[in-house]
Image (cartoon, rainbow, N blue to C red):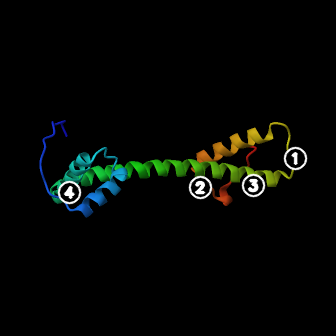
Amino acid sequence: MAKEKKQRFSYWQRPSQVVKMENAMPLSNCTSKSDFVCTAIDFYIGYLFQNESLDYLSPVINRSIKNVIGGVEKNICDMLFKLAVDTGMTTQMAVDLYDFPDGYYDGLRQKIAQQVAETNGTIYFEKQKPLDE
């Protein structure tokens, strides 16, 4: 909304409303009672006209939700990839039975990460090829 010069208006207000307003001001980030009243009026007018703005808000909310879910999905996929690599390393280490030469962990992590990436995390034990190939 464009900055407008405020005008003075006289209105009547119940003392109990003034007390509620003063208690709510810290929650609203308003700097004065006048600012609080203006914000409250804008909010109430928006509430009254919400059916008219529904056509605008629905796509905006929908896009926002999709963006948030997309970010969460990416984070989950990254964590699942790391979990698959660590699980593959643990399994391979159990197969190798404590014969771990120098640089074993780094090489194993690279091999397992490549295998998880190639299989997209889907592993079929019947078709599994040895890591040494």
Mark 1 or 2: in front is 1
For marks 3 and 1 on the same chain, the one whose residue lies earlier in the sequence = 3
Query: What's the distance in space between the residues labelled 3 and 1, CA to CA?
Result: 14 Å
Q: Is residue 103 left or right of residue 6?
A: right
Q: Are marks 3 and 2 in contact (CB under 8 Å)?
A: no
Q: Amino acid at mark 3?
A: Thr
Judged from the image, the secondary structure of the residue bearing numbered disc 4 is: helix
Q: Nearer the viewer, residue 31 or 28?
A: 31
**Which percent across, then down, holds residue 104?**
80, 40
**Looking at the image, which residue is at 59% across and 45% down?**
117
Mark 2 or 4: in front is 4
Local crowd size for mark 2, using a 10 Å CA cut-off: few (<14), some (14–19), many (≥20):
few
Local crowd size for mark 1, using a 10 Å CA cut-off: few (<14), some (14–19), many (≥20):
few
**Which percent across, then down, holds residue 44?**
20, 57
Q: Is residue 62 above or below residue 101?
A: below
**Looking at the image, which residue is at 68% across and 46% down?**
112
Q: Are marks 3 and 1 in contact (CB under 8 Å)?
A: no
Query: What's the distance in space between the residues labelled 1 and 2, CA to CA?
Result: 27 Å
Q: Amino acid at mark 1?
A: Asp
Q: Is residue 125 left or right of residue 38?
A: right
Residue receiving disc 1: 99
Residue receiving disc 3: 91
Q: Are marks 2 and 4 in contact (CB under 8 Å)?
A: no
For marks 3 and 2 on the same chain, the one whose residue lies earlier in the sequence = 3
Q: Amino acid at mark 2?
A: Thr
Residue receiving disc 2: 122
Residue receiving disc 4: 44
Q: Is residue 25 left or right of residue 97?
A: left
Q: Quadrant of the N terminus?
A: top left
